[in-house]
Image (tube, rainbow, N blue to C red):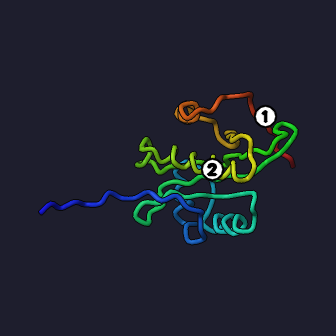
């Protein structure tokens, strides 16, 4: 009689209030300054905003990845577009296809919202060469630079 252990199943779903602690932990892994209370407020906001979304990757009830999305339209992007506001996979789960799976769901979400493209800007942190390589590997093209100024 063989003992066939079932492999863990990856589930990608919308972020819920109960995920705030785990998502905060992922944010801290990449030095993103936030707290569980701030994350709870963001999740509550997402529940009422049809143009923004946060998805989590979960294995055995453990959150191992997160992606944040929002719909935007501007002079720079005259057609509706989906912007990736965050993408984090837990350190020990990287290079296992989790980021790619989250991105596939992001593309689906963007299409459902009428988006004609999906884009990412390294807003608050320098983009590492690993990050650039990941995006290029899954079909993104680097275009331009971002300039910003703090408003006081």
Q: Is residue 80 left or right of residue 131?
A: right
Q: Residue at x 85, y 39 (%)?
A: 78
The disc placed on residue 12 is none
Query: Which quarter of the image is occupied by the N terminus?
Result: bottom left
Q: Would you name the residue on which mark 1 appears?
A: 147
Viewer-nearest of labels 2 and 1? 2
Residue 34 placement (x, y as % from top left):
63, 58
On the rendered structure, is 134 left or right of 73? left
Q: Residue at x 82, y 44 (%)?
A: 150
Picture coordinates of residue 52, whole percent (x, y): 72, 57
Dot 1 lies on which element?
A: loop
User: Residue 115 at x, y = what percent?
Assistant: 74, 46
Q: Separation of disc 2 and disc 1 at Cα?
A: 29 Å
Q: Which residue is mark 2?
A: 108
Query: Badge 2, how many Cα within 10 Å: few under 14, some, many 20+?
Result: few
In this image, 61 relative to 140: left or right?
A: left
> Which residue sits at x=36%, y=58%?
8
């Amino acid at each position: 009689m063989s003992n066939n252990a079932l492999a863990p199943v990856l589930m990608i779903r919308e972020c819920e209030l109960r995920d705030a602690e785990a998502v905060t932990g992922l944010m801290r892994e990449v030095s993103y300054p936030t707290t569980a209370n701030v994350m709870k407020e963001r999740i509550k906001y997402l529940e009422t905003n049809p143009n923004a979304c946060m998805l989590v990757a979960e294995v055995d009830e453990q959150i191992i990845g997160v992606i944040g999305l929002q719909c935007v339209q501007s002079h720079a992007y005259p057609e509706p577009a989906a912007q990736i506001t965050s993408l984090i996979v837990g350190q020990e789960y990287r290079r296992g296809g989790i980021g790619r799976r989250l991105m596939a769901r992001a593309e689906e979400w963007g299409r459902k919202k009428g988006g004609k493209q999906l884009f990412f800007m390294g807003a608050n942190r320098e983009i590492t060469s690993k990050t650039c390589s990941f995006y290029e590997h899954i079909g993104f093209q680097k275009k331009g630079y971002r300039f910003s100024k703090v408003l006081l």
